[in-house]
Amino acid sequence: MTTTAPASSSSTSAAIAAILAISAAATLFLFWLIYIHPAADAASARFAFLPALNALLNGLSATALLIGYIFIRARRITAHRASMMTAFGFSTLFLVSYILHHALHGDVRYPLHAAWRSIYLPLLASHIILAVAALPLVLVTFFFSLSGRIPQHRKVARWTFPLWLYVSVTGVITYVMLRLAQG
């Protein structure tokens, strides 16, 4: 296994600044898409499978994260890296599918008088807030790993892993709760 030489302090700072800027732009874009932009085809049943696909991709990402965690605990670095790349791939596909769903159908609201609303809304809020925090952490964690800065990677990964896992798992849970509430 080859590793890249560690980046200099100034290039590291520039990379992290770029990651933060990209993360902020992505978050603002998603906020605009979900809450401001009118849905292109809200009444259509086309692509009705996207929320289920999103939940599946979140579940697969969570599974890959857990497998990657098991591999790193066993010091199987190559398998860990493959698992984490797989989790990143599933999360990236989720993001594309999520953007497509919201561009076409807009926001889906939990029914006002449905059971579990008092659980669903705080769970969804924590999911959204932590997803915003997880994005730059995931990218910084990958940057440190891929640039050979393993001590920094380990420090950030201790925070990234549980956040990313929580966001992936709660994505599945909120999907199930919403579907059950809609009947």
Image (tube, rainbow, N blue to C red):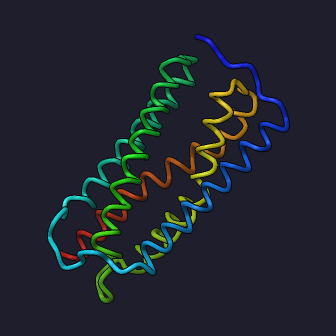
| Residue located at (53% from left, 48% from top) | 164
The vertical placement of 40 against 96, above or below, is below
| Residue located at (62% from left, 12% from top) | 2
Identify which residue, 159 or 84, lies in the foreground. 84
Identify which residue, 163 or 116, lies in the foreground. 163
Q: Quadrant of residue 113?
A: bottom left
In the rendered structure, the answer to whether residue 135 lies left or right of residue 55 reads right
Residue 75 x %, y %: 58, 17
Residue lying farthest left? 45
In the rendered structure, the answer to whether residue 162 lies left or right of residue 36 reads right
The vertical placement of 59 against 30, above or below, is above
In the rendered structure, the answer to whether residue 153 lies left or right of residue 172 reads right
The vertical placement of 52 against 89, above or below, is below
In the rendered structure, the answer to whether residue 115 lies left or right of residue 86 reads left
Q: Quadrant of residue 116?
A: bottom left
Q: Quadrant of the N terminus?
A: top right
Residue 148 x %, y %: 69, 23
Residue 103 x %, y %: 34, 69
Q: Quadrant of the C terminus?
A: bottom left
| Residue located at (38% from left, 61% from top) | 99
Q: How many marks?
A: 0
Residue 133 x %, y %: 61, 58
| Residue located at (42% from left, 52% from top) | 169
The vertical placement of 169 against 132, above or below, is above
Residue lying farthest right? 9
